Structures are given as C-alpha cells and as structure tokens.
Image (cartoon, rainbow, N blue to C red):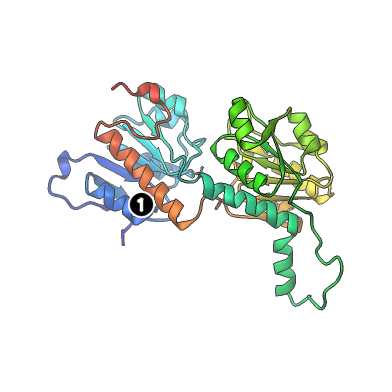
Amino acid sequence: MYDAGQLCDNSSLEVMKKVLVTKRVFPEAVEYLKQRFAVDYVGTDEGLPPAELRQRVNGVDAIVSQLTDKFPAEFIETLDGVKVIANVAVGFDNIDVAAATRKGILATNTPDVLTETTADFAFALLMAAARRVVEGHAFVHSGEWKQWTIDLLAGQDVWGRRLGMFGMGRIGQAMARRGRGFAMRVIYHDAVRQAAEVEKDLGVDFVSKEELLREADFVSLHVPLTDGTRHLIGTKELEQMKATAILVNTARGPVVDEAALAEALGRRRIAGAGLDVFEKEPEVHAGLLKLTNVVLAPHIASASVETRRRMSMMAAENAAAALEGRRPANLLNPELWRS
Ligand code: GLV
C-alpha cells in the first residue's frame, strides 16, 4: 500500500532525482520508479487540485501525470527543472506540448498498448446502442418483462451496414478491422489520407466529411482533440446524418457538441449514441441523462486491467528513460532529443 504523499525512504535521497506521480497508478509502476528515484506518490484517485499540483511540482525532475491534470502554457512556463511530463494516456490534449517544447521539457504518452482494448470498447458501445443492450438490462431488472413479443426492444442490425469513421490512426484502424469482421462497409474521413496499400489492406474507402455523414449507419470518432476537431460534430453535422444513424464517441468529449447531441437525440433526429467521453468530465449534459437512446460510460474504453497496468508501466518507463538520459519510447516532442 502507498500512502498519499509518501516519499521514498532512501539515504541517498539528496542525490536522487525526484518524480511526482500525481494520482494512483498500478503499484508496479510506483515500485519501478522507487527503485530508481525519490518518488512523491499521490496515491489517491482524486489526485491534486490545480493549485496543489502547482505547489507539489516544486523541485521535481519528472511528473507522471494523468489526463485530469492540466498543463496549459502558463503553468508549463513555471516548471523550472522539470525534464519530462509522462502522461498515462494516449491522448495528450491536457498538455500544451508546444509550450513544453519551448521550455525544453520532454512530453510522452502511452500509445499502442491500448489500441485494441479501446477499439473493443468502441465496438461494444456501437453494439450496445444498436441492439439496445442497456435498455434490455433495465427492462429485465425492473420486472417489466412479461412475455416474448415480436418487436420487443427491436434494434438495428450491425452486420453488413455502413461504418463511417472520423480518424484512421491506430485505434481507428483497429475499429475498422472490427467493422470488416462484421461484414460492414467501412468509409472514413481524416485530415491525412492513409496510403493506398493501407486502405486496401483494411478494406476502407476515403470519403468527404459530407459523404460520410450522409452515408454512414454508424459514425465513430477516432480523432485527437485539437483546435481543428473541437465540435467536429455539432448541429450542422447531426442534421446531415441519417435519422437511423448511431454516433459513437470514444475519442474526447469536446469533439462533439454535447448540447447539440442531446437535442438531436431527444427529438430522434438521429437514432442513438454510445458515449465514453464528455465535454466536462465527470459532468454529463443533463439532457443526455434523461434519454434512453444513449449508452453512457465513464471514460473506460482503455480500461482492461492488463491495459491500464501496461499504461502505468509505460509512463513510468518513459519518465525513467528521460531522467537516465535515454530516449523515451513515446516521445511527443522528438525535436528536443539530440542523441
Ligand atoms: C484515454 O482516454 C487515453 O487517452 O489514453
């Protein structure tokens, strides 16, 4: 067990580099760091309020952060002596990487280990929304189920339909393979088009944003949150989708205008949604909480035990590499690395 704020007991503390771990992670990651560094481990799930985080970073060499820790430019500019911010997430919109680069601070993330796990969950949300799994559970649980009827909780087929994806990076590709496994036609749109061999291999077709919205039975989001993708799906886009369409978001909440989505789902402008991420987590738009045609999850797409363990270790290894003068495996600002 690790107590909040526990500092590694080591006689050579003054010469050891210091790592701040801002929230609870899997214990092996803390053990790994403690074998090498003085570790200030905040072993709680709440982590540190912003003001406390700003105090606790004083004198640290590395920060193992999570997506709930915010590192805007003006905070990063104060991080004297910090060599690396190692985020336990593939997404890094919580860190101003350009500001970190200007300050000479390495930033790292945890890609690859969560790709298949996250795509599994995106497909689970798609299936759950299409086949009304959560409504079925609630129906049985409430004792309302009296008999088999011809259209009881009848949903939509997934097999053979059209999957439209925004983003064809690692997780997007894993989602596309799942769609192909269900004999879906997969179309996608992205800022950067994949090479022809990749498209052929995956069996996916590149289309315009408008065509995707018009043609897809399922629209799944796999883009990072940037200024260009904020509110990628808003009122205008929802109006372009089929009335039978289902939206799946496992990317980042602000990629969707949540108020516009709640409104569109409420008047059945689109048929349903499966959402793992929200604009102001852990808050969820009140309109969404009232609806039965949306499946809600608390940002758990990468949360298999093994994957979260591997993400914890990967961030610890990235921090250790940076402090020991080795190139971290998952460097977000490689321009800082001179070997
Ligand atoms: C989770 O959302 C992640 O970015 O890893």
Q: Given the current orientation, which residue lies at the most extreme left position?
A: 11
Query: Looking at the image, which residue is at 22% across and 51% down?
Result: 8
Query: Looking at the image, which residue is at 57% across and 43% down?
Result: 174
Tell me if residue 46 comes above or below residue 70 in the rendering. below
Tag 1 secondary structure = loop
Can I make out residue 77 in this image?
Answer: yes
- Between 211 and 55, the residue placed more toward the observer is 211
| Left or right: 307 as drawn, with respect to 243 | left
Picture quadrant of residue 253: top right
Query: Dot 1: few (<14), some (14–19), or many (≥20) neighbours within 10 Å?
Result: many
| Left or right: 68 as drawn, with respect to 239 | left
Tell me if residue 307 comes above or below residue 317 in the rendering. below
Q: Position of residue 34 (x, y in %)?
A: 24, 49
Q: Given the current orientation, which residue lies at the most extreme right position?
A: 150
| Left or right: 313 as drawn, with respect to 277 | left
Which quarter shows the C terminus? top left
Q: Which residue is mark 1?
A: 42
Q: Amino acid at mark 1?
A: Val
Q: Position of residue 304 (x, y in %)?
A: 49, 56
Q: Position of residue 36 (x, y in %)?
A: 22, 45
